[in-house]
Image (cartoon, rainbow, N blue to C red):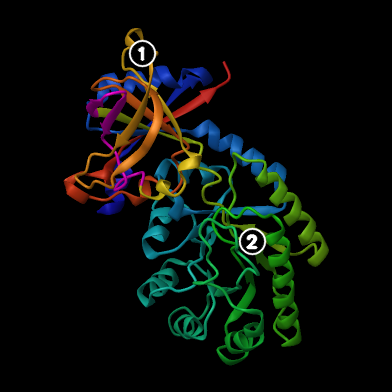
């Protein structure tokens, strides 16, 4: 039911528009199809194409497995599949979302190191045969319910200091645990460990962390050789890639050099789990002004999306989001700037989207556009206060240079 609902909220027709025609298109959609109280997204599929080209240019030997948790928009997943991406799923539901689009199960890695038994059994039933692990108990569960699954040892990155969301506290095997856990998985349980996986933490700022992590992965490969485990073939370098900063190229340079230094074997398969890299800049959220209050030189606005919808995770990522006010009628646009605050629609006083920012004066029904809203936004929608943030529709466009 949830999956069919999600699919129905994507407007499957792809609108061809010039690159500079996005504002006109948004105005037309707002006028023709949406009243105040009905936010919507616009996904530019051409941006996904450009980002895939950028990925291949910087990472020519790294296969992307898109992290579905970041944004499970069906049109996005379909486009990425057509461009050659594979998929990182963390649950039964994400696996079924990908499979429902006609994507083969051998293009999925079940990359949650701790999986419910029902999810493991489902992966076995549908043919998802590559997964991560980082504990003996996980080995026991997989041995019992999916014994033919190939495994990647999830190791802890040596340092995730500076990451927006460090992951090392929750996931990953320490170096001193490599030998006993590999021995248990391969020589005791008889499972097939085919490689190593790591994740340096969300939005890490120091590219050298990758070199340290790849060195640790090399150590895990060496332990496997020492234990007589059949030669491992996969190195998974995780996620944490953003397309809109020069840091991406710096990370790519560090990774490519480190792989050459530590893994000279040409038969090694290197994969990654990018999430925000692809959807972040491709999605624009369009909201309506549904309320307004003027207090002296300051203006407060209410819009039809908030922190219990698309803005919940972006409270922590606010520096990535661009804001653009847009009068529904171009002829009535104001030019005077006011200190402004934007609130979401709920009755929670914490539901503030942007505080003390500079905006032109807007009127009821005018639009506020939020750019770079494709990552960890729509997927966090709730039904708090009865506002249906789960069913915000997405319109598809294909921009061109003409």
| Label 2–label 1 contact, CB within 8 A | no
The residue under the point 32% across, 34% down is 342
In the rendered structure, which segment of residues is drawn in magenta?
290-311
Establish if 41 lies above or below 146.
above
Instruction: Give the secondary structure at mark 2.
Output: loop
225 left or right, relative to 305: right
Residue 85 in sight in this render: yes
User: Which residue is under mark 1?
Assistant: 334
Q: Residue at x 49, y 72 (%)?
A: 170
Tell me the number on the disc at residue 401. Answer: none
Label 1 secondary element: loop
- The Cα–Cα distance between marks 2 and 1, rounded to whole angstroms, is 48 Å
- Nearer to me, 334 or 227: 334
Q: In the figure, residue 363 lies in which quadrant?
A: top left
Q: Name, please, the residue furthest toward the left.
A: 386
**Looking at the image, is 159 positioned above or below residue 244?**
below
Question: For residue 306: magenta?
Answer: yes
- Name the quadrant containing residue 98: bottom left
Specify which label sits upstream in the sequence, 2 or 1. Answer: 2
């Amino acid at each position: 039911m949830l999956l069919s609902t999600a699919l129905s909220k994507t407007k499957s027709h792809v609108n061809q528009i010039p690159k500079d025609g996005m504002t006109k298109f948004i105005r037309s959609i707002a006028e023709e199809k949406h009243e105040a109280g009905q936010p919507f997204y616009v996904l530019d599929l051409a941006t996904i194409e450009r980002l895939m080209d950028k990925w291949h240019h910087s990472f020519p030997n790294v296969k992307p497995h898109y992290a579905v948790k970041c944004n499970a928009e069906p049109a996005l997943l379909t486009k990425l599949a057509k461009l050659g991406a594979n998929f990182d799923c963390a649950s039964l539901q994400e696996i079924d979302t990908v499979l429902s689009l006609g994507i083969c199960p051998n293009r999925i890695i079940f990359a949650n190191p701790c999986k419910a038994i029902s999810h493991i059994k489902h992966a076995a039933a549908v043919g998802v045969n590559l997964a991560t692990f980082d504990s003996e108990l996980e080995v026991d569960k997989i041995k019992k319910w999916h014994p033919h699954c190939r495994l990647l040892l999830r190791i802890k990155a040596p340092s995730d200091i500076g990451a927006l969301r460090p992951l090392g506290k929750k996931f990953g095997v320490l170096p001193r645990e490599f030998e006993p856990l590999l021995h248990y998985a391969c020589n005791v349980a008889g499972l097939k460990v085919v490689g190593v996986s790591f994740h340096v933490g969300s939005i890490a700022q120091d590219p050298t962390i990758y070199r340290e992590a790849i060195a640790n992965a090399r150590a895990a490969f060496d332990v496997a050789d020492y234990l007589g485990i059949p030669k491992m073939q996969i190195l998974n370098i995780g996620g944490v890639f953003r397309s809109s900063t020069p840091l991406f190229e710096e990370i790519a340079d560090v990774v490519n050099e480190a792989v050459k230094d530590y893994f000279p074997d040409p038969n090694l398969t290197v994969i990654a789990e990018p999430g925000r890299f692809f959807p972040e800049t491709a999605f624009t959220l369009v909201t309506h002004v549904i309320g307004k209050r003027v207090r002296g030189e300051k203006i407060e606005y209410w819009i039809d999306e908030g922190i219990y919808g698309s803005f919940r995770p972006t409270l922590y990522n606010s520096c990535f989001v661009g804001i653009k006010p847009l009068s529904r009628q171009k002829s009535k646009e104001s030019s005077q700037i006011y200190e402004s605050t934007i609130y979401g629609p709920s009755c929670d006083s914490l539901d503030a989207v942007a505080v003390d920012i500079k905006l032109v004066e807007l009127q009821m029904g005018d639009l506020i556009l939020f750019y770079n809203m494709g990552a960890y936004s729509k997927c966090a929608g709730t039904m708090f206060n009865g506002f249906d943030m789960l069913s915000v529709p997405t319109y598809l466009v294909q921009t061109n240079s003409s």
